[in-house]
Each structure stands twice: as structure tokens, then as C-alpha cells.
Image (cartoon, grey):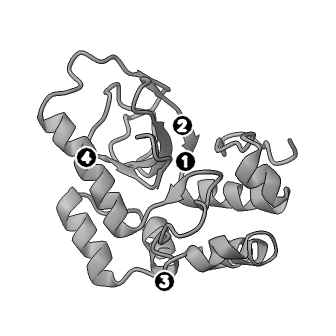
Amino acid sequence: MKVLWDRMENWLKVHAPDVLADLNEGASEPEISGLEDVIGFALPDDIKESLRIHNGQSGDAQWLIAGWELLSTERILEEWKVWKELSDKESFTEWNADPQEGIANVWWQPAWIPLTYNGCGDHHCVDLGATEDGANGQIITMWHDSGERALLAKTYTQWFEYIVQTFESHDAEYVFESGDFEFDATEDKTNG
């Protein structure tokens, strides 16, 4: 993760120094373990390593990933609690999900831990409750108003590396303003 973050930081220095300055310092071990204690799941090692490098962003600049906030441990917990409260109230019992293979056929479950946020209730999540056809730790989409649940990567490292490669292959206008940014690391789309 350190090498990937170094590459991301190098790109940001040139193309978006304000976004680089907006990244928080790394999370402490108590912050990470406290998050895990509340959500009831151990985070994959690569996500913990990433959080130790940058614990999300402060929100004083545009969001890091093409209009998506990179969540800190505190923000992960805030967003997770919103979904958990809705789930506990059985808010999703009438809603039908449309998941890809390997993703549980539910609207939301506590094992989906948000990593990003777009300001409208949508997330990219680490899935710690994959079905037998999936892989725990895979990265999936979570839409607030659509049952589509898509697999984006088998691991956080694969997903983050794909994002870094996409940044490196494009300028700031493409990354932050074009609306063409792809998040699906299951296919090579970096040349698009």
C-alpha cells in the first residue's frame, strides 16, 4: 500500500495539490481497532495499512476519488451506523436487490463496510460477507436507490491500484470533472 500511496501522492502533487493537502494523517491503532469493535468485523490487512497511511480526508477540498469522499475511520463508522439503523428498523424488507454473483442477495448487510461516499447515500464497500462464489474482502457498489450490487475488485489492493493507474493515465480534468471515471478493476479500462 505504501508504494501505491506514494504514486497517488506524486500524481496529486502535480495535478491536485489541494486534494493532497486534504488527506488526513494515518489512523492510530486505537482508531482502527475501535472501528472494528463497533462494526464487529476485522478489516482486511490492506485496508488497515491504507488507513495507517491516510485516514481518509478532511473534506476541505474536492473529494479524492472522482467525486467520492475517501472515508476516515470516523466517517466509515458514521456511514455504517446510518445503514445499520435503517436495517435494524427493517427498512429494506420490501426492497429487492440485484447482486452480481458472489454478493449476498440483500439490500444491505452489516458486513458491507463503506470506504467512499458520494454525498447522496452511495458507497464503494468492502464486502466481508461474500457468498461462496465471492471472496471476503472484495470491493462492491452499494447504491441507496438501486438494488444493483456490482463487483469492482477481488481485494482493496487490486481496486486501489486500478484507481492509481487511472489517475496516472489521465489529467485532473478527466479524474475530477469528466464523469467518465471507471471504478471497475475487474477489467483493464485504464486506456479508455
State the CA–CA distance, disc 4 to disc 1.
Answer: 26 Å
Classify mark 4: residues with Cα within 10 Å, few (<14), some (14-19) or many (20+). Answer: few
Point out the tag, 3 or 2, that comes first from the N-terminus: 3
Residues marked 2 and 1 touching at CB (< 8 Å): yes
Residue that appears at 12% across and 33% down: 89
Q: Which residue is mark 2?
A: 151
Q: Which mark is residue 82?
A: 4
Task: Tell which tag, 2 or 1, sits nearer the viewer.
Answer: 2
The location of residue 147, given as percent across then percent down, is 42, 23
Task: Tell which tag, 2 or 4, sits nearer the viewer.
Answer: 4
Tell me which amino acid carries mark 4: Val
Tell me which amino acid carries mark 3: Glu
Residue nearest the viewer, comparing 85 with 189: 85
Identify the element where label 1 is drawn. Answer: loop
Tell me which amino acid carries mark 2: Leu
Classify mark 3: residues with Cα within 10 Å, few (<14), some (14-19) or many (20+). Answer: some
Identify the element where label 2 is drawn. Answer: strand
Point out the tag, 1 or 3, that comes first from the N-terminus: 3
| 100 in relation to 115, above or below | above
Task: Tell which tag, 4 or 1, sits nearer the viewer.
Answer: 4
Residue that appears at 80% across and 50% down: 174
Q: Which residue is mark 1?
A: 154
In the rendered image, which quarter is residue 104 located in?
A: top left
